Amino acid sequence: MAFCRFRSASSLISKFLPPSNTLYSFSSETESVKEKIMNHMAHLDINSQIRSCMSLAAMRIGTIIHNIEVNPGQGGKLVRSAGTLTKILKDPTRRYCLVRLPSGDEKLSDTKCQATIGSVSNPSHKTKKLRKAGKSRWLG
């Protein structure tokens, strides 16, 4: 899959730059354009990829996330149970980012904190019926 992304990025670059079999050499300005395009493509791929973990500052408004850190570097503490998700409400350009938790509460979280893009699997976890008290006890 990574090879496919690289191939599409290189085809995009070939549209913007002249062919490499020409007799002149590339200037530093052309190389910087090539690097800018590659960095832009890598940034788009990371942001659109589910299950990638990154800081909240690198995410967009409306991104669905889970496994959020409370303090930077501490490890994911929030939104880890089955079928849960969180949404980013405000642009994380400043020190804090506003997220809406599954309970409906809104929490300010540091933009250096890491989170995983996507929701936790098994969204039908809440609708499961246990049928008797013993089943709940067996599950702990």
Image: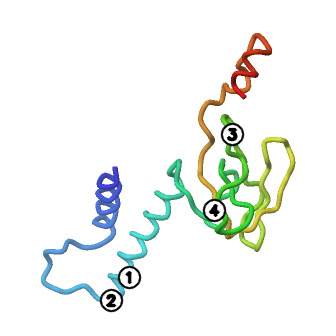
Place of residue 17 in the rendered image (x, y in percent of width and height, measured from the top left): 29, 72
Query: Is the Cβ of the residue at disc 1 closer than 8 Å to that at disc 4?
Result: no
Residue 76 sits above or below residue 132 on the image: below
Residue type at mark 4 is Gln
Query: Is the Cβ of the residue at disc 3 closer than 8 Å to that at disc 1?
Result: no
Q: Earlier in the sequence, mark 1 or mark 4?
A: 1
Image depth: mark 4 or mark 2 in front: 4
Q: Residues within 10 Å of mark 1 (few under 14, many from 20)?
A: few
Image depth: mark 1 or mark 4 in front: 4
Whole-Å distance between the Cαs marked 4 and 2? 35 Å
Query: Is the Cβ of the residue at disc 4 closer than 8 Å to that at disc 2?
Result: no
SS assignment at label 2: helix
Q: Which mark is residue 114?
A: 4
Rendered residue at 74%/61% (across/down): 70
SS assignment at label 1: helix
Rendered residue at 59%/51% (across/down): 117
SS assignment at label 3: loop
Query: Is the Cβ of the residue at disc 2 closer than 8 Å to that at disc 1?
Result: yes
Residue type at mark 1 is Ser
Rendered residue at 76%/73% (across/down): 95
Q: Residue under circle 3? A: 81
Q: Which mark is residue 51?
A: none
Residue 69 sits above or below residue 37 on the image: above
Q: Which mark is residue 28?
A: 2
Place of residue 56 in the rendered image (x, y in percent of width and height, measured from the top left): 66, 63
Place of residue 47 in the rendered image (x, y in percent of width and height, measured from the top left): 54, 57
Whole-Å distance between the Cαs marked 2 and 1? 6 Å
